[in-house]
Amino acid sequence: MTINTFDDIKQFINPKSDDEFWHLQILKRKKENPELGSNSLVLKTHYITSVEHLEKLMPSIINLCKSENARAMINLNRRSFEQIAFQMLRKVSEQIFNKDFKSVRKSYENVCGKFGSEKDKKWIIDIDVNDPSVVKEVQEFIDGIQPEGTKTLVVLRTKNGFHIITKPFRLDIYNKKFPEHEVHKNNPMNLYIPEQLSFI
């Protein structure tokens, strides 16, 4: 089973200015590639500025994932080129001051992964069981906690279950009810996983 969430997530690629982008990486993981020396290897990074931009890149993204036994992941919380530039300047200055020169080349990617500029933040609830009734139970519960109202934006299939993409909510109340279903506030989600990786 191939996982391709492009049609589901393109609604969130809605730039309001030329300064905004979405951070996409193609990752090769040791879990599926035991020969890797590290836990993961970034094969390619894209800074997505529009749906059309992503559409243009999708064939090459898919081909690279298939040929390298890798997966494409995208963070749905937008980034700002301006803010990332200033954060990178700060990080590089600290690295140079600390004589950590080898890490400087990785600074931009590191900062992109940490600093978002999204006002309408999107969280990911990781449901690690293949049971739609659990998804429904979680959805109904989060709709009833502050701020009240529908919070689910989209539900996506994963290799072991589901990701619920949501608006923010009272996490302390949620964690008491569902500690087993982790919430990620600023993590990338699967955009494309080829068939051979989907259920590894």
Image: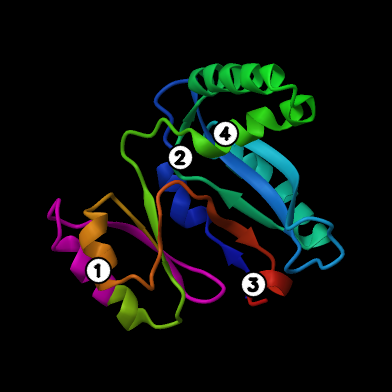
- Whether the residues at callouts 3 and 2 have beta carbons within 8 Å, the answer is no
- Amino acid at the residue labelled 2: Ile
Work out how far the residue at label 2 is from the one at label 1, CA to CA, in angstroms.
33 Å
- Whether the residues at callouts 3 and 4 have beta carbons within 8 Å, the answer is no
Q: Which residue is mark 1?
A: 176
Work out how far the residue at label 3 is from the one at label 2, CA to CA, in angstroms.
24 Å
Q: Which residue is mark 4?
A: 112
Task: Please tell me whether mark 1 or mark 3 is closer to you in this view.
Answer: 1
Task: Please tell me whether mark 2 or mark 1 is closer to you in this view.
Answer: 1
- Amino acid at the residue labelled 4: Cys
Q: Earlier in the sequence, mark 3 or mark 2?
A: 2
Q: Which residue is mark 3?
A: 198
- Is label 4 in a helix, a strand or a loop? helix
Give the residue at x 52% y 69%: 158
- In the rendered image, residue 124, in percent from the top left (x then y), is placed at 40, 57
Q: Earlier in the sequence, mark 4 or mark 2?
A: 2
